[in-house]
Amino acid sequence: MDCFSKAYQYLKFADFPSTHPEVTRIVRYIDTATLFPLLLVAKNSHQRITLKHSESLRSGNVLSGVPLVLSSHPGRAIVPLKNDFDHYPLLGYFCFLGIGSEESAMKVTHDGDFITRIEDGAVMNVVSGWLQEGVDLSLKPGPRSEKERREQLKMTNGSRRFVINEDGTVSPKNCQNLVLGLCFHPKLFLVDRFSQNRAVFKNIDVLLKKKESDDDDDAVMLELLSHPNFAITPISTLVKHQC
């Protein structure tokens, strides 16, 4: 991705027009390599996604797996963000999911509850079981026995149970006012202090003065110097949905 971005910058510096074949080719590569966050959104949100093969998933008859290709966003699909699982003591093993190129589409089955990845039996999960707008989706190791299956069905607010709706959307079974969706805006992460991706505040002097004073008036916007025209904002409104 960095290589494509640098190539695009060089072409722009060389005054190549946006219609030049090399520019359009690089833009196409960047678009293919871009991963968007997969998260929960309101059922009527314009950010909701719909599955191309939802009927096959709903039937549960395709044991070889169905690719999670999107009909709402042609050329896109639900994909794992990494090839391997991360591990943290409190969270166990997990792998975040996102929206990427359909060539990397995850193949799954659906048994009425679990959306299960074919290659290793990992199951889709709402992170931390928090059934609210803006919460990420991940993969977690799936059950290896009937006993584990029963336990996972009851885990963290039913976070691993999903419904494939007739319109192709996907909802947490315990909160069907929400569906899977995507966010076109980059998310905020912790990075190394000297990373090229670090966020640098535009109004740092004003922020430091506010820290030293007790004046709560005139709030400061978190605009970024490092990323012109960008700022830190919430990705959703905190609304408690009636599930």
Image (cartoon, grey):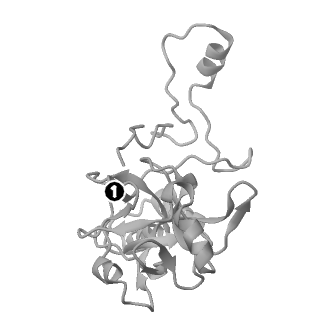
**Image spot of residue 200 (x, y percent):** 62, 37
At 57% from the left and 60% from the top, the residue drawn is 155
Tell me the quarter of the image containing the N terminus.
Answer: bottom right
Please give left or right for residue 167 compared with residue 30 in the image. left
Reply above or below: 30 against 111: above
Reply above or below: 169 against 13: below
At 28% from the left and 70% from the top, the residue drawn is 168
Q: Nearer the viewer, residue 238 or 83?
A: 238
Badge 1 local density, few (<14 within 10 Å), some, or many (20+)?
Answer: some
At 32% from the left and 67% from the top, the residue drawn is 19
Residue 213 seen in render: yes
* Corner quadrant of residue 73: bottom left
Please give left or right for residue 11 compared with residue 47 in the image. right
The residue at which mark 1 appears reads as 176
**Image spot of residue 122 (x, y percent):** 58, 75
**Image spot of residue 167 (x, y percent):** 23, 68
* Corner quadrant of residue 203: top right
Q: Nearer the viewer, residue 127 or 216?
A: 127
Q: Nearer the viewer, residue 131 or 119?
A: 131
Reply above or below: 9 against 80: above
Residue 183 seen in render: no
At 34% from the left and 72% from the top, the residue drawn is 70
Number of marks in the rendered image: 1
Badge 1 amino acid = Gln
Q: Nearer the viewer, residue 189 or 141?
A: 141
Name, please, the residue furthest toward the top: 214
**Image spot of residue 119 (x, y percent):** 57, 85
